Amino acid sequence: MTARSLPNILAMLMAATVVTGGGRVQAAPPADGLILWLDAAEITDASIAKWPDKSGRGNHVLQDIEERRPTFTAQAWDGHPAVHFDGDDFLAVNGFQGLATGDRPLHVLIVMRGRGKSAHPAQRLLDINSRGAPDSPFPNRAGLWIGNQESRKQFRLGVEQGDKGEALSEVWNDRPHLLEAVYTREQAFDLHVNGRREQRGVFNGTHFLGFGPHVSLAIGQQVGQPDAADSFFEGDVAEVLIYDRPLTATERFETGQYSTKKHGLNTEFRPIPQFEQDVRPILAQHCHDCHGGDLQEAELDLRTVSKMLRGGQAGPVIVRGYPDRSEMLAMIEAGKMPPDGDNPLSADEIRTLRDWIEADAPSQETVVLTAEAAQITPEQRGHWAYQTLKVTEPPQAADQRIRLDIAFAARRQFQRHSHVGYVARVILIHSPIVIT
């Protein structure tokens, strides 16, 4: 048994099922890679000195100062429990376990409700920062945070003292939401609100430099800034999940369903379309007449994922994870394909294609991106480019005193030009040379 597997097994044993307020049993979130699991349903004290971590990593968030402790409420919204932060309290852990040093991936899910009107313009919902040693200062750009800025109601994922990205929907609006911030390494990130991806981008300029060996985490405030009035979070947090890897599309759907049912959320999670069952029948009905087995206009074949990724004369027609960059979907949504409005796709069919591409175009086939070897005809094989190289003796020149290429010297001899002798370097530099 590895050191990594033991915490995951403990988490699975502790949370095999979750019972909702209505008595229904829902599956727990994935355990693989889970490094923090805070669940308000586990709290019994009104004033919270410790919010226990259910991941098995021991990352319990604490507050020793009584007046800085958030409170537990059993009826935060529609009978669902949450931890309430009133704008001057927070929880934190030093020596956070589970994040390796360097540029590491992270997937954070938070069920929260932000207060619509607040005196705190730059709230830190979650803050992760790192340094070289427990007593050393925090360097710039060695951590990530989730919150808002400039009193905006959209949530942001930011680099400590660096770049940031912002989602589109307002979530500081007195309603519960599921926020997802995914950092996938190499400065790339995704932001989701209630199952809907609203931003995909990269940090540039003041980008993330990676985690140091000593990591600290705070809920409701900046790490190491206990008195920063502007950055206190004001609202409720029902659950926090942090993974040291991005969840797969299927895991995101399952975790989204779990959170939706458990916390009474209004989300947009839908089952992930599969190519063989959901996508190929749509393409067969609308597209294979021109891009199938009998005919492949523009050398485009839409019968397999591999061939769509290789594409035709204009290149690949789908880009995994990016429906708005996928040529096939753009042509369909613009009404250009199928041509002349013949047998158009329905809105539900187009949505299926969009969801499928957004989920990285899953399929059962083994995707092969290498193009099939071209068949060369005997006539084409006769081209000089296909001929085997041969060793050829260079022409001989009688006058070998000239320090020029032998072939040039032979040409001079053939044209009966005489050797003019050596000249000064300055003349060679400033005089044009004409070779006939």
Image: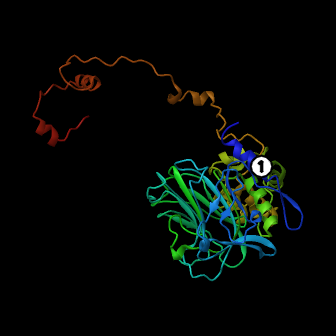
Count of numbered labels shown in the rendering? 1
Viewer-proximal residue among 9 and 293: 9
Q: Nearer the viewer, residue 335 or 130?
A: 130
* Residue drawn at 71 percent across, 51 percent down: 248
Q: Quadrant of the N terminus?
A: top right
Name the amino acid type tagged 1: Met
**Residue 187 image point, x, y percent:** 53, 55
Q: Nearer the viewer, residue 236 or 386?
A: 236
Residue 394 lies in what quarter of the image? top left
The quadrant where residue 85 appears: bottom right
Q: Is residue 194 above or below residue 405?
A: below
Identified at 31% across, 19% down, the residue is 395
Q: Secondary structure at mark 1?
A: helix
Which quarter of the rendered picture does the C terminus lie within?
top left
Quadrant assignment, res 396 = top left
- The residue indicated by pointer 1 is 12
Residue 273 in the image, given as x and y percentages of width and height: 79, 55
Residue at point 19%, 41% (across, down): 432
**323 to the left or right of 259:** left
**Farthest residue, direction left:** 424
Residue 108 is left or right of residue 11, and the answer is: left
Q: Give percent across and percent down for residue 170.
A: 65, 75
Q: Circle 1: is it few (<14), some (14-19), or many (20+) Cα within 10 Å?
A: some
426 sits left or right of 164 in the view: left
Residue 18 point in image, percent of width and height = 82, 59
Q: Is residue 311 left or right of residue 407?
A: right
**One can see residue 398 in this view:** yes
- Relative to 356, does residue 376 appear above or below in the rendering? above
Residue 98 sits above or below residue 23 on the image: above
Q: Is residue 149 visible?
A: no
